[in-house]
Image: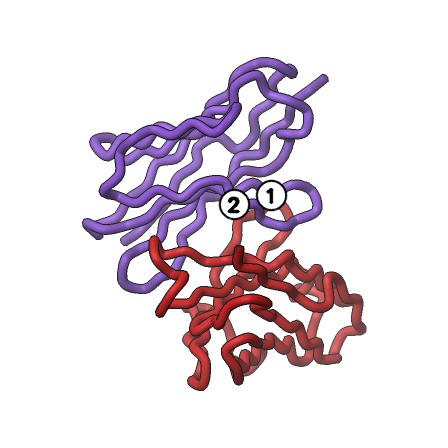
Amino acid sequence: AQKVTQAQTEISVVEKEDVTLDCVYETRDTTYYLFWYKQPPSGELVFLIRRNSFDEQNEISGRYSWNFQKSTSSFNFTITASQVVDSAVYFCALGGSGTYKYIFGTGTRLKVLA
Amino acid sequence: GAVVSQHPSWVICKSGTSVKIECRSLDFQATTMFWYRQFPKQSLMLMATSNEGSKATYEQGVEKDKFLINHASLTLSTLTVTSAHPEDSSFYICSASDLTGLARNNEQFFGPGTRLTVL
C-alpha cells in the first residue's frame, strides 16, 4: 500500500527562522514520484517540486531546498529565512508509476510570525 | 505551462438541488482528469479518475450515483453533485493529465478549486 506521512500538523516560526517540513512515504513501486505543493488560504495548490525515484539529488530553489533520502523513505522540505508569505499548508504527495494517482499527506500548516 | 480552470470558483445552493462543476484544460488535451474533495483543515482525498470517453473510476466509499462525472471531451470534465446536502459542503479540486504527452514524471495539473456550500 502507498502512504504519505506528514507528522507535523502545525509549525509556528518567527520570520527569518529556517524551518524543515518532514515527509515520509511508503511504496512498493520501484518507480515513483514525489511532490510538494503549497496551499495558501485561497485554496489553490501551488506546485513546488517534483522528484522521481531515480534522482536522489537534493535541490535548491531560492530559499527552498529539498532533501530526498531513499534509504529512509523521506523527502523533506526546508525553507530558509522564512517569510510571512510562506504561511500556508504544505502537502507532500506520492505518485505511482502505474495508476498515475496521487496520495497526499495530511499536510503541515506553517505559520510564520512577523 | 499547462493551465486548468474550474467553474464556478464558489457556489452556494439549497439542500436537495444539484450542482455542476466544470474542469477545463486550457492549453493541452487531458486524457485523464481527477476529482478531489477537501474538507476544512483536511487533506485532499481522491474521489474519482475519469478518462475521456469512458466511465469514471470511483474510489472506495464515493457514491457514483451522487457524484456524477462526465469526461466527454479531451478538455472538459464535469462533476455533478446530485441532491446536495450540507455534508457535501467542501472544496472540490480537479486535476488533469495528458498520459500521452505531458504526463512524463507522472504530473497532474491542478485547477483552482470550487468551494461548495450547501444550505
Residue plotted at (72% across, 66% down): B86
Residue plotted at (43% across, 74% down): B31
Return the residue at label 1.
A39
Chain drawn purple, letter? A
Return the residue at label 2.
A47
Residue plotted at (24% across, 34% down): A70
Residue B48 placement (x, y as % from top left): 47, 70
Residue plotted at (47% across, 29% down): A61
Q: Label 2: how many residues lie within 10 Å, few (<14), some (14-19) or many (20+)? A: some
Q: From the viewer's perspective, is A67 left or right of A114? A: left
Kindly indicate the quadrant of the structure image that contains residue B90: bottom right
Q: Residue B66 carries which label?
A: none
Quick one: label 2 or label 1, which is nearer the N terminus?
1
Q: Nearer the viewer, residue A49 or B46?
A: A49
Q: How far apart are marks 2 and 1 (CA)?
A: 9 Å
- Type of residue at label 2? Phe
Q: From the viewer's perspective, is B119 left or right of A8? A: right
Which type of secondary structure does the marked residue at label 1 adopt? strand
Residues under numbered marks 2 and 1 in contact, where contact means CB atoms less than 8 Å apart = no
The relative height of residue B43 versus residue A20 in the rendered view (above or below) is below
Q: From the viewer's perspective, is A73 left or right of B35? A: left
Q: Depth-wise, is mark 2 or mark 1 nearer the camera?
A: 2
Residue A45 placement (x, y as % from top left): 58, 48
Q: Colour of chain B?
A: red
